[in-house]
Image (tube, rainbow, N blue to C red):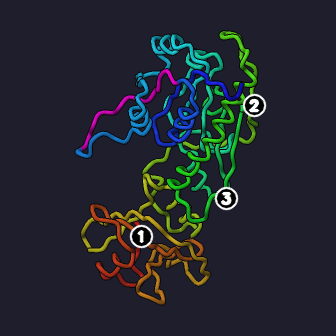
Amino acid sequence: MSSASIRIILMGTGPFAVPSFEAIRAAGHNIPVVITRPMPPVKSRGGPPPAPVRDWATEHGLPIEAPASINDPETVEQLESLGADLMVVCDYGQILGKPALAATTWGGINLHGSLLPAYRGAAPVQRAVLSGDTETGVSVIHMTPRLDGGPIVATRRTPIESTETAGQLEERLSRLGVEATMEAIERLQRELGSHVSGEPLPVIGSVQDPSKVSKAPRLSKAEAEIDWSKSARHIDCLVRGMQPWPVAYTFAETKPGKPPIRLAIQRVTPVADETVTADQIGCLLPTETKNEMAIGCGDGRVIVERLQPAGKNEMDAAEFIRGHRLENGFRFGKA
């Protein structure tokens, strides 16, 4: 039965969902509707924010719905009327309650960007990079109303590269998730193919160990400020983990009496250096060449390679030093 076409409701908003949704469409499954989040009001001249799932569904002529609440009784009734076998949820942005999950014969599966039960929540990829993990992966769960808490149906593992940003890793995991998603769909077809709608669903997959649960709350801008007293490794993980948003930052008071410049730090190299003293933490350090921006930190130095001053274009860090004629000992961060 694994090769048979089934009726699948797709629910997603962000880019993480698109590769798996496209694989489902390409496999010939019947997609009666694509559910996505409502478009927020436009607050800037830049136009509306990206809507990858909406754009993908529009490109392929698929019906789109964007209910304000997926758990509204009227919305649940509409889902039930579709007579779908399964819903596949990824990067959607709303938690489904029991009535919504019961709107299809087999319930729902969710693709999540971590090796559950680690990093339940909105920012699993970013939190793995921030924590300095060397491995992560994706998990597909048979959904329950508890956030990311359902039994695990399929997983894929992968190393985290030492220079990989959260944005790069998330894109790679979205592609890795295709295999896991399709495996999970086929498994539910095999094990629930004769299931009667309305009857209690059996447990499919491995129940998560509650003692190994960790949380991955949404990132905040305040978390992205660099504390130069931390280790070089910690700062490197912060810089990589905060991309593409909110981006790690520090301050530079280049002119006495003037407000400090906010610097978004785009790329760094951590360097262990036992010669750096406590009074050099956060300070510009001497280097063998003037083409380096080295800042002292808790256990060494951080070579800043790329940065972006507020209101300016991204540039080489050495260019910023030369442009502002910064001398060794210049201190970064808030006074």
User: Is 253 on the left-hand or right-hand side of 171?
Assistant: left
Q: Residues within 10 Å of mark 1 (few under 14, many from 20)?
A: some
Q: How far from the left and from the top, in percent, is residue 150?
A: 68, 30
- The residue depicted at 49 percent of the width and 70 percent of the height is 268
In the picture of the structure, the residue carrying the numbered disc 1 is 306
- Depth check: 329 or 60 in front? 60
- The quadrant in which residue 244 appears is bottom left
Instruction: For mark 3, give the secondary structure.
Output: loop
Q: How far from the left and from the top, in percent, is residue 135?
A: 67, 55
Callouts 3 and 2 close, C-beta under 8 Å = no
* First in sequence: mark 3 vs mark 2: 3
Specify the farthest residue to the left: 45
Residue 220 position (above or below residue 162): above
- Quadrant for the C terminus in the image: bottom left
Asked whether residue 150 appears in the rendered view, the answer is no
- Depth check: 267 or 179 in front? 179
Callouts 2 and 1 close, C-beta under 8 Å = no
Callouts 1 and 3 close, C-beta under 8 Å = no
Q: How far from the left and from the top, in percent, is residue 168?
A: 52, 55
Q: Residues within 10 Å of mark 2 (few under 14, many from 20)?
A: some
Q: CA distance from mark 3 to mark 2?
A: 26 Å
| Amino acid at the residue labelled 3 | Thr
- The residue depicted at 74 percent of the width and 35 percent of the height is 208
In the picture of the structure, the residue carrying the numbered disc 3 is 134
- Quadrant for the N terminus in the image: top right
Q: CA distance from mark 2 to mark 1?
A: 45 Å
